[in-house]
Amino acid sequence: MADVDVVVVGAGLAGLSAARELVAAGKSVRVLEARDRVAGRNHGGFLSNGVPVELGGQWVGPTQDVVLALIEELGLETFPTYDTGDSITFLDGRAIRYSDVTFGLPPETLAEVGALWEKIETLAATIPPSAPWQAENAAELDRQTLDAWLAANTSDTVALRFFRHLVPALFSAESPELSLLHFLGYVRSGTNFATLLSTTGGAQERRVVGGAHRISERLAEDLGDRVRLGEVVRTIKQDADGVTVLYEDAAAGAAGSVTADRVVVAIPATLAGRIRYLPPLPASRDGLTQQIPAGSVIKVQVGYPTPFWREDGLNGFVLSVDDAFNLVLDNSPPDGSCGVLVGFLEGAHARAAAELSADQRRELIVTTLVKYFGPRAAEPFDILEQDWMAEEFTRGCYGGRLGAGVWTQYGKALSTPAGRIHWAGAETAQEWSGYMDGAIRSGRRAATEILDAR
Amino acid sequence: MADVDVVVVGAGLAGLSAARELVAAGKSVRVLEARDRVAGRNHGGFLSNGVPVELGGQWVGPTQDVVLALIEELGLETFPTYDTGDSITFLDGRAIRYSDVTFGLPPETLAEVGALWEKIETLAATIPPSAPWQAENAAELDRQTLDAWLAANTSDTVALRFFRHLVPALFSAESPELSLLHFLGYVRSGTNFATLLSTTGGAQERRVVGGAHRISERLAEDLGDRVRLGEVVRTIKQDADGVTVLYEDAAAGAAGSVTADRVVVAIPATLAGRIRYLPPLPASRDGLTQQIPAGSVIKVQVGYPTPFWREDGLNGFVLSVDDAFNLVLDNSPPDGSCGVLVGFLEGAHARAAAELSADQRRELIVTTLVKYFGPRAAEPFDILEQDWMAEEFTRGCYGGRLGAGVWTQYGKALSTPAGRIHWAGAETAQEWSGYMDGAIRSGRRAATEILDAR
């Protein structure tokens, strides 16, 4: 007799969602989590004044029906991201305020950006979310990097630079690092490009009161002692009778094992590739995990006594083509009792900033915020950084990306079970791939695979 | 007191070369090898008539001074690859015999191929082998895939298809899967493009009597019981006092550990990334191992009673733009006592062929050889396949490749030590990166780092 019906590896939203479905169907489940906390790429922190901030994924929005319903089901609440007033774009040394959907771009650039944008929406709509590698022209779309496609589709150097800056905002990676097919499939899975990039009406529309990690915490509460923290899974054996999952504690000391009928591996694919599988996995799956690297991002929360930028008629949103700390939003608590700006160092900027000392990074951040919002930005009461690249059990955010040629050669292995091993995680989702909504969907899909298999 | 001065992980040419240097300098060394054999990506097999054939890397040639000297030092011998007679190119349904350096291409295609070739040689000569990311225009060269560069530099569709077929012959990967900078750096490290692609006068000029794996076997004999087989390294801990290397047997059963002052990790980077490091490695190194996938190749040895193609004035070399089993050479023993053809399924062809049954693959191979060499090719007495993708402790050949953007963002981490951990392996070599010669150089370089550090 196996110890449990199903072992779930990873207590992020995907793993916890799989476990919840399986338990609801009467299965016995053990969730093994390497960290001393649940929630994976969601993580909560507190500024020194006690205000909670999100150190990882944080926004939800329209068409993310699954996560929105789950939030409600768990008795949590959302509130709108502050979005009143002007945004600012920094471009070639100029600060451009705007209050529409133009990003403040000069008319000639705007026309070119609009044309590219339209091409992206049109192409993305042709990608089947369930199988991007089966898109019409998949081979041609996958052969190109996003960067090459952008360069081939505009001769406007400003429009090109603008798009090259948008890419890290979505992927924490640079445009040469992903295939056009990956980009289009991602856009398609998140409804469309406009939805991905919008606050109101889009993927950054709402936040969870107390932080998005509370979704995972509530799920884990319901699962009780089925969830075991600090257990690092190292080996998964399977045979005709079932699976044996071998783990060790975080210090690589005490070891343990649990047997089950099936296992759901609900961690990023690049980390899933570090587990040893006996017998070894098919080459198609192993090859995929060799080349689905995570993005590079340092997320920064900066606390001020008040959201002073609001007094200047600003909504806190800044996109700068000129700066390393190039994307900022208002992340103040719902009551506005203090001011919080959240900003990102992404892609090449993140890798460069990770080489700086903490003091140097702080200076970079504060100096940039003073440039964006004036001298009142010079005196934050707290700065909280989260470098996701340095996290042993994440090793990069926002998620895994596929470079040129990978989707068409290896894409099928992303979610195809390997015998008794099922794969979950935000990247394996067909809808809202890479987002919290997709993570939940992926866990439920893995649970369904197991329930259907018996 | 540590158990030994240095632990070496991996008993391929790199690891064994590091161990040899360290032992010669008076250090105590332990080599931990996961397999039940040494030699890594070299591996020897025998056809059913007892003739030895090379299932992995096999050729050496001019400017590979280090491996050639080592072969001599170890008392081994080389012999020339059979290269007398005509080669054949298959292109658009035609078989073209030739005996020069033209690949039999029609004049107009040849002129275009020559022009591209010249551009490659010129660009490659500008890459500093010690640091490709410091090349002039490194950012531009790394931003492009090799495929995009090829397409942008010729409008001749035949020349383009020809080059796209040459790429898997060198990398077991398709042209979109590597950055132009990676390609150029690889060419530079192997002297030049002509050298890489040539038999006589180039990288395929000579073979080792008995097989290239004998180099590793001789090295291992000299190291004696310092080399331990069947020990799979899973965790490396380091602190101010030294390192502890934790391993388990191949069945993930019995565990052991060894302490040392330093460790050389001499396995492909993608596998090195599967070891757990405590404390965790810097993000720059971890990010590299997330995206240096191995190529896809199935190597096939086909034995015949005689090298009958020689009677037809053929040297056995075939390059086909039309076929999956698209690269074949004469691999008969030095005395010609039987005929052996060695051929390759590479890149996308390898991935597709791996999905076939053994019988289907055999039929594909034999049918193709009959097309190339006539009906006498229909009756091989033996076929030996080696699918390097399926090998748990290699997971692809010929080596790790870097896609667009990776060299400039992560290249430095390829060989920069992480504290007491030093990196070796053919891919880390400055000269003959990816070749046996480079593997030996890389092991010696790691040994020198350690000797210099003390």
Image (cartoon, coloured by chain):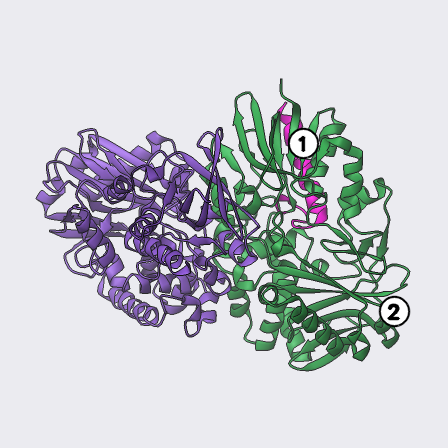
Chain colours: A purple, B green
Name the residue tied to disc 2: B306
Residue B403 in sight here: no
Residue B317 in the image: x percent, y percent? 76, 69
Mark 1 neighbour class, 10 Å CA radius: few under 14, some 14 to 19, many 20 or more: some
A150 lies left or right of B132 = left
Amino acid type of the residue that numbered disc 1 sits on in the rendered structure? Thr
Figure quadrant of residue B14: top right
How packed mark 2 is, by other alpha carbons closer than 10 Å (few <14, some 14-19, many 20 or more), is some
The image position of residue B84, as x and y in percent, is 85, 68
Residue B85: horizontal and vertical position, in percent? Answer: 84, 71
Q: Residue at x 53, y 42 (%)?
A: B274
Residue at 33% across, 59% down: A163
Confirm whether the magenta stretch covers residue B430.
Answer: yes
Of residues B137 and B80, the one nearer the viewer is B80
Q: Nearer the viewer, residue B304 or B453?
A: B304
Q: Residue furthest top?
A: B1
* Magenta stretch holds residue B397: no
State the residue in front, B113 or A10.
A10
Q: Is residue A423 above or below residue B425?
A: below
Chain part drawn in magenta: B427-454
Q: Badge 1 sits on which subunit?
A: B
Give the left or right position of residue B287, taking residue A90 as reference: right
Q: Quadrant of residue B254?
A: top right
In the image, what residue occupies the spot 75% across and 54% down? B58
Instruction: Decide which of tag 1 and tag 2 comes sooner along the chain.
Output: 2
Q: Nearer the viewer, residue B134 or B392?
A: B392
Host chain of mark 2: B
Seen in the picture, residue A323 relative to A452 is either above or below; the reply is above
Q: Which residue is mark 1?
A: B448
Type of amino acid under label 2: Thr
